Amino acid sequence: MAAAPLAAQAPHAFVGARIIPVAGPEIADGVLLVEGAKIRAVGRRGQVAIPQGATVVELAGKVVMPGLVDTHSHIGNGDGGDRSNPIQGDARILDALDARSDNIQRAQAGGITTVNVMPGSGHLMSGQTVYLKLRDGGTINDLLVCRDPMTEVCGGMKMANGTNPRGDPPWPGTRAKAAALVRERFVKAQEYRAKLRAAGDDASKRPDRSLELDALVEVLDGKRMVHFHTHRHDDILTVLRLREEFGFRVTLHHVSDAWKVADEIAAAKVPSSIIVLDAPGGKQEALDVSMTNGAALEKAGAAVGFHTDDGITDSRFFLRSAALAVRAGMSPGAALAALTRAGAAMLDLADRVGTLEPGKDADFIVLSGDPFSTYTHVEQTWVEGRKVFDRADPKDRAYQLGGYGVMNDRDVHWHQGMEDH
Amino acid sequence: MRPVTPRALGALAAAAALAVPAAAQVAVRGETVYTMAGEPLKDGVVLVGRDGRIERVGPASSVRIPGGYRTLRAKVVTPGLVDAHSVVGLAGILNVPHDQDQLERSDPIQPELRAVDAYNAREKLVEWLRGFGVTTVHTGHGPGALVSGQTMVAKTRGASVAEAVVDSATMLAVTLGPDATRTFAPKSPGTRAKAVAMLRAEFVKAQEYRAKRANPDSTKRPARDLGLEALVAALDGRLKVLVTAQQVPEIQAALRLQREFGFPMVLDGAAESYLLVDEIRAAGIPVILHPTMVRQAGTTANATLETAATLRRAGIPVALQSGFEGYVPKTRVVLFEAAVAAANGLSTADALRTITIDAARLIGQERRVGSLEPGKDGDLALFDGDPFEYVSHVCGVVIEGVVQGEGCR
């Protein structure tokens, strides 16, 4: 399905499309110059020098924009923490993902090139998330954004409040208990970090190693973003309170009541990753979820990104989040950024993805028309200079449209687990 | 199908009618008016009279708006949308036991359950659908049981079922396949074949019951059985059988059952119907297709975005549905489902048919709704652009001449 890697080829010049770089104004008749895995230049036709020997791809009538960044997804059929404890910061979703899952192909068909794959929300802390590039690959290692999970931070930390992470002990039964358990664990992490610092290079003085506290120290040190599932307005405020106490970096997720506390979110300078749904309800916390959330946050001056929460919504329809947010009052520019640049920032990947700029990864999509139009299809998806989806290829097209035997049945299990999202 | 409310509801409806806001005389003028009865009108006018019915439809050049009519203007006007199959009103927004009445699990076969006894007209999801132009909804007992009960047709208005109901007993909801087996353990059915055997046995019983009930000697008639009465209504052609069948074996089983018992049938869901186009067409069976954006997992794993177009091309009557959702979002919206169908092979007009006139025909309400023609109900949806574009808005919904709410959504 993948084209030959461009790394070993001549530069490719994609010319004639309407280019939406997100980093700057749109270009009506543009050139996107790609060399290897990187973008070399973006500009108007005639303005960008096309090197001799470059392969020229005519895209007149098409729209080119950055590959989409899905800040919250469950593709790959992974799971995080088990039912032993509500706080399991040691569990890594990257140890549980199936890179051959059909929903990864569907995400490529939806124009998604970067994704934050998360464990569920049935825990206060369900484990470490992982940031993936949707390259074609048969193993999870082929998809990692980081180079080496042994030494690098390869994702964020999933947390949740509200009703999902509730239950019989050791799960909390109330909101106050949930917050107390989380505070207790962060205090422990602070103490662990203090001991580590005090020990310095003297290994004999270090505390026994805790995989979970190691990860929480990364959180406290700001190296690992907390991705916090939260719906009700007071739960959102609880997240902001915890953040203030412990100083971690956090992205709010779902944020169903965002329109009620948009000013507080903006004042805290905390970004929100929101979902756009066809209808409210289905769970009590999401009764007031509104298509106006994007507009309300934008108006308040808060950063907004979108997510699929796939399987709650299907990765193939991710573009529609932006269009429906515009329908409800968000500006087109902010809505496009929410699909790309804003999401990249939430994953600490803004230096690599989210815009079409020289030096950034050559992650982009080719659309048949305006990104907000119902009638527009994702025609091609490129990751790091390789084409990973092409609607003209019957096999790829099938992933976009469906059909007999296209989707494997293995993700049926999510019906049982869906209440965790 | 009963065009009037049953006696039990009739009195209620009469009393409640007084509480419904009176229809004013309304004129709707649209730059484009999709009447769904002929070509769209450019600069068209629809006049709705005091009785809530459409008086005249035509180009503004020939239909003058009389004085005293409230005039609404819109870029695009369509008939009020018709959701051919939903569970709103029975399956509520909260998704907790007290507002989930679409599926009774005490027995796999319960044809006696009536939708009108469970429909909550004040349910927020009803209002949600109306906000996106849906004025008529075929709703009731959902998929998940071999026979889960009956369905009804309602207008998306009113404070009580009596104010909302259009047809109190529309179809009998049947589900074949894995979605309705193994959910009643330890009760049967546990397999596909057993499910079909149980259904056949029940219809055979209904045939015998019908024959015995016809005995001229009333003392020899069996006692009334509400469940069998509903099945007899289907056998007599008074109640359609709505068979939710997603996969090939279930669709074929449904066609087989229909041949055996001769009841009027509508295929529902029908995710793999594109593999059986010839058989479905030959049987003359219409399809209420799954939502275009249905999750492709389980029995709908093999769905495609192009099935509506495939069926339409084959000449099979097809309507779209919002269907049943078990979690978030709690309902879908047929406007959006038709939009995606329009982006995947259906023309705008044909996609509109699946949520207007063709949907109305499938639920037996084509005389009242689904198109803009004199004598029909004054149900309209007003848009500020192409109805299917995500960035367009619904800026007005009219039901029987009554403007429902203000503003754009």
Image: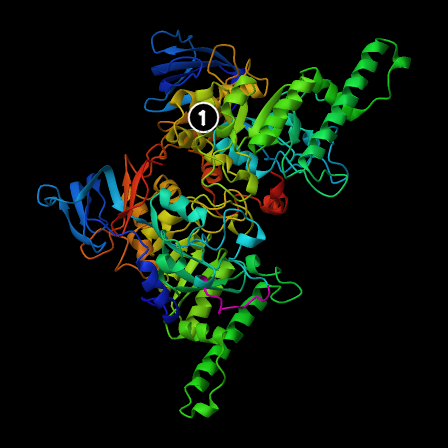
Residue A207 picture location, percent across and down: 86, 19
Most extreme residue toward the right is A204
Residue at figure coordinates x 57%, y 63% from the top left: B192
Task: Examine the image and state in which quarter residue B265 appears.
Answer: bottom left
Query: In the image, B127: left or right of A165?
Result: left
Residue A133 appears in view: no
Please give the residue where the numbered disc 1 appears in the rendered image: A296
Q: Tell me if A398 is positioned left or right of B368 in this view.
A: right
Q: Residue at x 68, y 40 (%)?
A: A166
Could you tell me if residue B43 is visible in this image? yes
* Main secondary structure found in the magenta portion: loop
Q: Is mark 1 on a helix, strand or loop?
A: helix
Instruction: Kindly identify the residue that appears in the image at 57 percent across and 58 percent down.
Output: B178
Q: Which chain letter matches label 1?
A: A
Q: Where is residue B202 in the image (x, y as percent from the top left)?
A: 52, 74
Residue B31: percent from left, percent from top: 19, 37
Q: What residue type is labelled 1?
A: Ala
Magenta-highlighted residues: B106-115
Measured along the vertical axis of the image, is residue B45 above or below residue B311? above
